[in-house]
Amino acid sequence: MKLYEYEAKQLFSLYNIPVPEFGLARTPEDAKNIAQKLGGKAVLKAQVLVAGRGKAGGIKFAESPQEAYELAKKLLGMEIKGEKVNSLLVSRAVDIERELYLSIVVDRSVGAASILSSSEGGIDIEELAAKSPEKIVKVYVDPLVGLKAHHVRRIVESMGLFDEQKKVLQDITLNLYKLFVELDCELAEINPLAVDKEGKLVPVDAKVIIDDNALFRRKEFAERASAELSEFEAEAKKHGFSYVELDGDIGIIGNGAGLTMATMDVVKLYGGRPANFLDIGGGARADIVEKAASLLLKHPNVKVLFVNVLGGITRCDEVAKGLVNALATYGKGKRLVVRLMGTNEEEGKRILSSAGISAFDSMEDAAKKAVELAKVM
Amino acid sequence: MAVLVNKNTYVVVQGITGREGSFHTKAMLDYGTKVLAGVTPGKGGQNVHGVPVYDSVYDAVSKHPELNTSIIFVPSAFASDAIYEAVDAGIEVVVLITEHIPIHDSMKFIRYARLRGVCIVGPNCPGVISPGESKVGIMPGHVFSKGKVGIASRSGTLTYEVAHAITKAGLGQSTAVGIGGDPITGMNMIDMLEMFREDDETKAVVLIGEIGGDMEERAAEYIKRCSYEKPVVAFVAGRTAPPGKRMGHAGAIISMGAGDAESKIRAFEACGVKVASTPAEVVKLLKGALRIG
């Protein structure tokens, strides 16, 4: 779960990583008042989760509280890559001399935390990694041992800093690692970590991603996570489905993430466009299948529903019952293509055929049929 | 011979009294797996489908010294404790079915197990099956048959799909391993390639990958580096997955511009691994590689 910049900065403060003074504005009046408190000049930053807001015009500088008011009026409510701006971080502007980079990330290849640092921050780390990988210092931290002084020395000594600045960076690194571990982060990033005109180290931007699987012990974030979902996503989540919205017209239901993904791929391979990804998981009973199918049949973009189930612990007869029920209620004007195989396959096919639905044995044949139907509808 | 599990595999089920644990204990027993004991703290003395339940893995091991493998159905918040217990009690192979384990937990216990020489399969996996010998997992046994193809996969049902096709074609499997759908897993594709390399029964290997991370790229590099002797066929799920979205599995996400299917397919092809465009095509490519039909 990705946090907003203001949330990340609140956490930084909590972990003694000094961030420039800021306030959160939900109205132009808020922005004006905060700018006033900051001494008149301020930077206004749209709080969105998508990347690239700077280039999209989501960051503005105000010379006075009145200008902050005017700019906030324009920024609040605007859309950045489809995401609406509901709040602004209004912060003291920093006179940047140079920009550094510091992040901690879970490295999947190594199975450990990896601390990335560079004396050239400000740009995307992926961009920097592609352009000049030699400028990134990477330090792996054994999860059983934790962060040691020698790790921190390697990072601090690579940045080209004065002694006093080194001491500050050392503390920032230690505190960021503490935050990373204690809050179950997948990523904690400071980019840029600015050096201002007076030589002070100032985290200008902050990015934190919390592990979704750890939300059960991070209740403070768990609530926010569910508040952000779309109507369809929220309903899918309520029933325990993995659901991702796409932009096509063929609804996809499968059991198991890999099989569902492969189903999408095969649809695309034959020239169709998947409307979504919906994994009902293992062992789904008729009522669960009915809910999944109803959800997609209700979706305005779905013309054809393609259900691909390979029964192991999931029983084909249960799947068939659920589908027949969903179709009876929400099937008007929609088509259904089913591929059923595995446990209780015969019974499942019998239930489907008595409702006038034929089932395929092969997912490739079924996918071709679904694509064909979507094209003529 | 098979890998990881075989007819000398003796299983303890951790979390045996839960719904999943009990259901799959029955299914494993029906398959012929030697399930000797179960563990649920506080429920020692009961039995589940005739399998005696103990309070701890230590108790189970002291009563059944031949125990060498554990399968874990414990809920995610308690799973890491169960793994440390299995490792400390001297279990050699731990199959971790549990999904949704925090990654900071799995980083630690995977590292711990590696240092102790214990194989962890999972988390978030369907388990391991060596057809005709032992099934330590939740997969439907009937889609598998004894044979010559080793399978290592990041996905459950997709493994069954491919295994079923391999069975129908008469090739069968030596061992099929679901390594798990999490970003960090105990066994990776290279570990499995190494095991299959040493296994006489395995004549070809199928790798089933998906978006996220770089496990497939590293496996491809390994195959090239060691001039892998056995033919390898791959399938990669998620060609149509959008970036930044988690596709069901915690590990199935294209993030920071890395981990897309195209990169994996390119890496495999560059190293001489044939990549199937549909699950059904895996069998065709296998037959070609083994010069059959």
Image (cartoon, coloured by chain):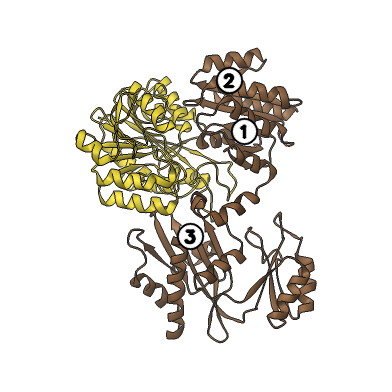
Chain colours: A brown, B yellow
Q: Nearer the viewer, residue A195 or A218?
A: A218
Residues marked 3 and 1 touching at CB (< 8 Å)? no
Badge 2 marks a residue whose secondary structure is: strand
Left or right side of B34 for A90: right
**Amino acid under disc 2:** Phe
Mark 3 and mark 2: Cα distance apart in space = 48 Å
Can the viewer see residue B118 in this picture?
no
Q: Which residue is mark 3?
A: A183
Q: Quadrant of residue A374?
A: top right
Using the image, determine if residue A159 lies above or below residue B70.
below
| N-term mark: 2 or 1 | 1
**Amino acid under disc 3:** Leu
Q: Which residue is mark 2?
A: A360
Q: Chain of mark 3?
A: A
Can the viewer see residue B78 in this picture?
yes
Q: Chain of mark 2?
A: A
